Amino acid sequence: MLAVALVRACPEVAFLLALDATRRALAAFASGELFAPTITRLLQRIGVMLAIGAFVGVFIVPGAERLLGAGPGYWIAFDVSAYVLGAVGLTLTVLARVLRHASELQTELDEMF
């Protein structure tokens, strides 16, 4: 069924968006931006996309498949890789906040001296 295939593809779309943000972040790193707001925004985007993809894969996809009649018979998937991706995503989000704060402090110090 096309509907089931579309439901199953939802987490992969989020993961592909995270890969695109990763490519952008690495390009920014290569150009010399370390604490710039661009890097923190991209790291946050990567983290959010990974966490969303993991959440959708664990909680939304099995329930939607079950409602469409093609589900595995459970509402929440026990998928260790999705749990790991979700944890990595949330960690990147926290790191982006730390880098944003460090960037603000660096800007403040540069203005003082």
Image (cartoon, rainbow, N blue to C red):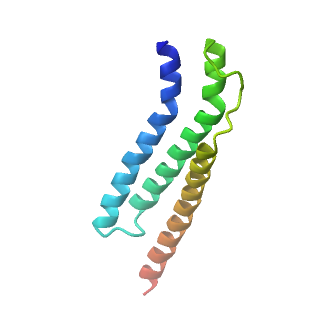
Task: Name the image quarter holding the C terminus.
Answer: bottom left
Is residue 20 shown left or right of residue 65? left
> Vertically, is 40 above or below 51?
below
Asked where in the image residue 28 lies, by quadrant, the reply is bottom left
> Vertically, is 26 above or below 59?
below
Between 104 and 62, which is closer to the camera in this rendering? 62
Q: Residue most toward the left?
A: 31
The residue depicted at 66 percent of the width and 22 percent of the height is 72
The residue depicted at 64 percent of the width and 26 percent of the height is 62
> Vertically, is 7 above or below 69?
below
Between 98 and 104, which is closer to the camera in this rendering? 98
The residue depicted at 46 percent of the width and 76 percent of the height is 106
Asked where in the image residue 71 lies, by quadrant, the reply is top right
Q: Residue most toward the front?
A: 72
> Vertically, is 96 above or below 74?
below
The residue depicted at 50 percent of the width and 44 percent of the height is 49
Residue 50 locus on image (x, y percent): 52, 46
Residue 89 locus on image (x, y percent): 56, 51
Residue 81 locus on image (x, y percent): 59, 46
Between 53 and 65, which is closer to the camera in this rendering? 65
Residue 48 locus on image (x, y percent): 53, 47
